[in-house]
Image (spheres, rainbow, N blue to C red):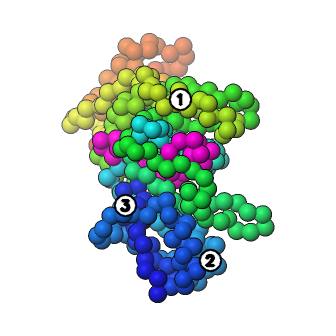
Amino acid sequence: MTAPFDVDAFGVRVRVHGTGAPAADGALRAAWAGALSTDRGDAEREVHLRADEPFDAAMERITVDVTLAALEARRGRALLFHAGGVADPQGRVAALVGPSGRGKTTLSRELGTHFGYVSDETIAVDAEHRVQAYRKPLSLVRDAAPKQQVSPQQAGLRSLPDAPLRLGTLIILDRADEYQTPTLEAVSLVEALPELVTQMSYLCAHAEPLQRIARLCDAVGGVRRLRYAEASDVVALMPEVFEPSAHASTWRSWPRQTSAGPFTTDAVSDAIISDGAVVVMVGDRLQVLGGVAPVIWQAAATGSDLDAITEDVVAAYGLPPRGDVRVLVGEALEQLLEAGALNRR
């Protein structure tokens, strides 16, 4: 019977059990060589290689099992981005955020041959902006065969730098063949939040989740978008990627108030105001309120009725070129109620 082993999945110690077959368990341990834990003590989570599946399928599945177990364990303890990442010699981590199809994995692996490979799956950032690596096995495509699970070392990726890892930059990926020359551009907080939030796990487990993300964006100088076509072309741009940015957006939190008006914001867990927009979290859904909606929402949230809200809209924007302003404001108010950004008292 082969002994289980522990791996470090972005700060979570997970115990991995094999099937007891020496050859299979040896391959399992070799694939996880980049994430083996050197700590002693009890594991926070345990997973088992499934003996009722073909070995290659079981090897892929156990990576998912480890990831999900670690995500659940870090729930509310760190911001968890679905992202790849590499680190420079100073330990500054570039988090590469994007949904499937944006080339995140391919880019992470290409950059990992030049810089310290952190992960191609999850970047976890704690309250002090520290990053824990997740050097899980990589899935390599083979002709007419299931994907092969290999360690970062076997794949030729670099080791972590001899420095503490801290988030240095947040990058949203945008890959298309038309981007022949890779470029970086600043992204406003209001524009970045919908893309970041959809690529995060357990965000609503945090108090004031939007403010937590906004403060992190401030700490790294704002979010940037990387437009590129080929992963290999990005290598030359990395010195600029790692350099501190200075494009943070101005924002403020919306102070929750108790009012006796006809509307409440009880369903809103957090809200921030930036660039004339109001961004709210309702459950696990993010909503960006633009146009006249921010004026309506803030007035309703502070106790105003429809007449007073209409006066605020007219004061801010003037009378509409056509239509009854009170009716138009009422329709916009109903949309906010339907979306859950407001509730009737």
Q: What residue type is labelled 3?
A: Val
- Residue 173, image x and y in percent? 58, 38
Residue 29 can be seen in this image: yes
Displayed quadrant of residue 256: top left
Of badges 3 and 1, the one in the foreground is 1
Which residue is pictured at 37% across the width and 13% down the height? 315
Upstream in sequence: badge 3 or badge 2? 3
Upstream in sequence: badge 3 or badge 1? 3
Nearer the observer, 259 or 287: 287
Can you identify the residue that label 2 sits on?
Answer: 55
Disc 2: CA contacts within 10 A as few (<14), some (14-19) or many (>=20)? some
Disc 1: CA contacts within 10 A as few (<14), some (14-19) or many (>=20)? few
Nearer the observer, 217 or 338: 217
- Residue 189, image x and y in percent? 44, 30
- Residue 318, image x and y in percent? 44, 12
Going by the picture, which residue comes out furthest to the right? 144
Q: Distance between the residues labelled 3 and 1?
A: 31 Å
Question: Total of numbered circles in the picture?
Answer: 3
Can you identify the residue that label 3 sits on?
Answer: 12
- Residue 332, image x and y in percent? 46, 31
Upstream in sequence: badge 1 or badge 2? 2
Displayed quadrant of residue 11: bottom left
Q: Which amino acid does label 1 sit on?
A: Pro
Q: How far apart are marks 1 and 2 (CA)?
A: 41 Å
Q: Please, is residue 182 above or below residue 128 in the view?
A: above
Can you identify the residue that label 1 sits on?
Answer: 239
Q: Which amino acid does label 2 sit on?
A: Phe
Which residue is pictured at 51% across the width and 65% down the height? 32
- Magenta segment boundaries in residue numbering: 108-130
